[in-house]
Image (cartoon, rainbow, N blue to C red):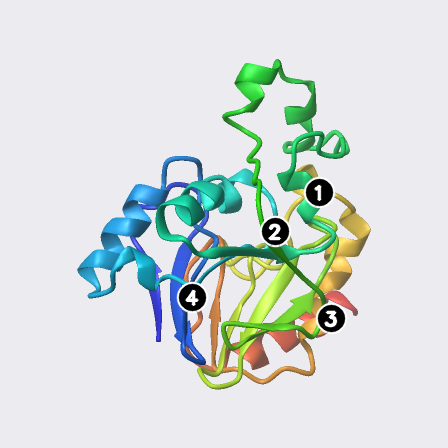
Amino acid sequence: MIERIPGVRGAQAYLYQGSGSLAVIDPGYTGSHRAVLQFISQYGFQSRDLDWVILTHHHIDHAGTAFALCQATGARLAVHRADAPYLQAGRPRDRMTFWGMADWLPPRLASYVVSSADGDLRLLEHGDTVAGLTVVHGPGHTPGSICLWSAAESALFLGDVLNNERGLRTPPWTVNHRHAMAKLAPRRLNELRYQRAFFGHGPAVLEDADRRVRAFVALREH
């Protein structure tokens, strides 16, 4: 089961049920946990039914409300090991991109732009599974940027490894930690097979998604 969660500010958030677990992927900006909780309730679940909050990367439009959602539900937070330091107090300074500018903001203002998470994190690596989803590490947009692949649902959650706002694209240099790596990250998807693709930004592709992504990668390499 995959459902897009309406009312979330920032990136698109998804409710996923697989392997006996219920997960929210990328719950959005700070304050969006209320929309997530409302949707979970309307869909017939209770807040305590949520097992996982999974982040494709640490940027605030995907991760801002993650800790609040975990506090409200008791769910565990999962993020790639390389992005986990960015969710902690004393986070590494990022390069001067749109997101890196947060490191130069006054602390009180930065609290609205930079998320933090205390407590028990599940640190993900390439090839791990969480809630029935396989982790595909595609660094560049952030050090720990990942996709999440469901063989059972024939679906791939791409986070910001690719967006689909004006056709398939990699993110612009202004939001990437390492732009050259971000341009190469979609190569890691070539071996996967999936009918549907769900993006952090832009509409889902619901048929032949893997073929379209492979065609995009091939075009970029010519």
The amino acid type, in three-letter code, at marker 4 is Ala
Which of the pair 40/186 is nearer the observer?
40
Q: Mark 2 or mark 4, which has the lower sequence index?
A: 2
Q: Quadrant of residue 47?
A: bottom left
Residue under pointer 4: 204
| Residue 10 in the image, given as x and y percentages of width and height | 43, 42
Q: What is the crowding at mark 3: few (fewer than 14 residues within 10 Å), some, or many (at least 20)?
A: some
- Residue drawn at point x = 49 percent, y = 71 percent: 197
> Which mark is drawn over residue 34?
none
Q: Mark 2 or mark 1, which has the lower sequence index?
A: 2
Distance from label 2 to label 4 (Cα)?
A: 19 Å
Q: Mark 3 or mark 4, which has the lower sequence index?
A: 3
| Residue 218 in the image, given as x and y percentages of width and height | 72, 74
* Circle 3: element type: helix
Is residue 74 left or right of 46 when viewed as pictured? right
Q: What is the crowding at mark 1: few (fewer than 14 residues within 10 Å), some, or many (at least 20)?
A: some
> Which mark is drawn over residue 85?
1
| Residue 111 in the image, given as x and y percentages of width and height | 54, 24
The amino acid type, in three-letter code, at marker 3 is Arg
The quadrant of the rendering that contains the N terminus is: bottom left
Distance from label 2 to label 3 (Cα)?
A: 18 Å
Q: Mark 1 or mark 4, which has the lower sequence index?
A: 1
Residue under pointer 2: 57
